Image (cartoon, grey):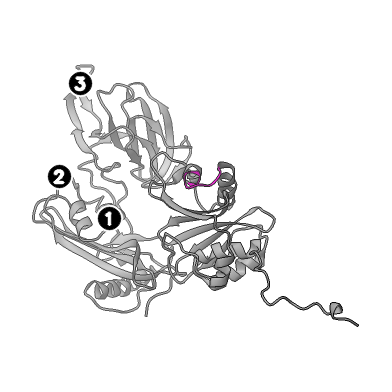
Amino acid sequence: MNQDDFPIAPANPPKRNLSQGMKSLVVLGVLGSASALAGLVMAGRPDAAIVHTADAAVPLPLAARLVSAVDVADMPRQLVKAEGKLERNETLTGLVSRLGAPVGEANAALQAVYSKDLIDHRRLRPGLQAETFVEDGRLTALAIKADADRSLLVTRTLEGGWQATQLNAKLIPSYKRVAAEIDGSIYNAALKLGAGDQQVVDFASAFAYDIDFQREIHPGDRFEIFFETFVDERGNPVRHGEVLYAALDGKALKRGFYRFAPSDDGVPDYFDEKGESATKFLMKTPINGARISSNFGTRRHPISGYTRLHKGTDFAAPTGTPIYAAGSGTVQRASWNGGYGNFIKIKHTRGYETAYAHLSRYAKGLKPGMKVRQGDVIGYVGSTGASTGPHLHYEVYVDGKPVNAMSLKLPTGRKLSEEPAMLAEFMQYKQSIDSLRNGGTGPMAQLMPQEVPVSP
């Protein structure tokens, strides 16, 4: 037996190149979750996207931190990281390729995202963040900040394909109250105090049946918006949530509404302090941000020159402005109607009908016989037919006779005072909201999403 029969390991063994799995692990370090990484590496070749929950939202830029100093030294030096934001009229493929990925590989990686419906490429907004990892001219991984609380990571599988991973932030609900005197517009005042666009829209929706914000808001009127906010575990704001209370104290109206979902149907609505729904049978104005350009009544027609009854109300608005169904009902007509141009007529209960004229186009899929709910988009403002400019001509009929929609006394919505059990439920909920509005603490489980942990 000689020494050659027992090979001796060299004192300084050569460094091993990283395996493809380890390279993926390096890139996967961007997730910041060791458990998530282990699952991804062990899975090898999943057929479906893997969904994980992280302790906090993943900020961009992302950093690979889960490898040792030796591993980093072993990595090829041609690993290039690039980050950028989606520009207006740019596709996501265009962004990824602009960051250095070959177009074909960018398409293949993004297909793993699209095939699992993790993002809608038709509704991407400018400013969306992405980061690429390119090794020796070859795309290794792609990170996308899909939402404030959701990130996506696309990596190569062992076979050279692609797998998509979704990482959701663990959010903690909190609350914010903004209140001020109106000087100019509620929108500007609310945004300065920290509310978002959606909170102002929800506030306006709660009062849509009671007040005309264009003509019935005066300097010195006061408003209040109390709404949900969500923060990550570090306390960083991630997004805003539902408006839980909205109030207006002005010359034209003094009223407050609580967003409440009765347990018998689970449908959220805004109720005043007595438990009466803010929702009316029909909306006063089935369009937002428009001004009345012509009222109901006898007038000289601007085109024909004849003096006759103007059977509706005209709302001047830019072409393309959404038009909403004033109430729930059945579409009777959605077609051209002479001087009315593109025309919609909806039949409601209790003998009511509404009509909408001069539309530029109809909502996708709208047709006679279709059921619509109050607030559904049914079409868009235009100037078709006998029209001198873009506007909505809106008519209301009661038992076949045209009536003035602006002065019509409409049936109210649900009254919890007529339902003792639901009223008691509402009053308990109202008490918890009032406590939170005044700086108190306590459970408020009724509108908290089940999957979102409530902070202690």
Q: Return the residue nearer the eye: 44 or 76.
A: 76
Image location of residue 411, percent across then percent down:
29, 51
Q: Is residue 105 above or below residue 271?
A: above
Q: Which residues are magenta?
A: 96-102
Judged left or right of residue 74, residue 373 is left
N-term mark: 2 or 1:
1
Which secondary structure, mark 3? Answer: loop
| Cα gap from disc 2 to disc 3, whole angstroms | 25 Å
Q: Amino acid at mark 1?
A: Ala
Q: Amino acid at mark 2?
A: Arg
Residue 302 - label: 3
Residue 295 in sight here = no
Residue 197 in sight here = yes
N-term mark: 1 or 3:
1
Residue 215 - label: 2
What residue did someone put label 1 on?
206
Judged left or right of residue 274, residue 153 is right
Task: Please give the name of the residue rendered at 40% of the width and 59% of the height, measured from the top-left corner.
Answer: 148
Image location of residue 377, percent across then percent down:
38, 42
Task: Please give the name of the residue rendered at 27% of the width and 23% of the height, measured from the top-left corner.
Answer: 387
Q: Residue 227: say if magenta.
A: no
Q: Return the residue nearer the eye: 445 or 12.
A: 12
Which secondary structure, mark 2? Answer: loop
| Cα gap from disc 1 to disc 3, whole angstroms | 36 Å
Cβ atoms under marks 2 and 1 closer than 8 Å? no
Q: In the displayed orientation, state which residue is furthest to the left.
A: 220
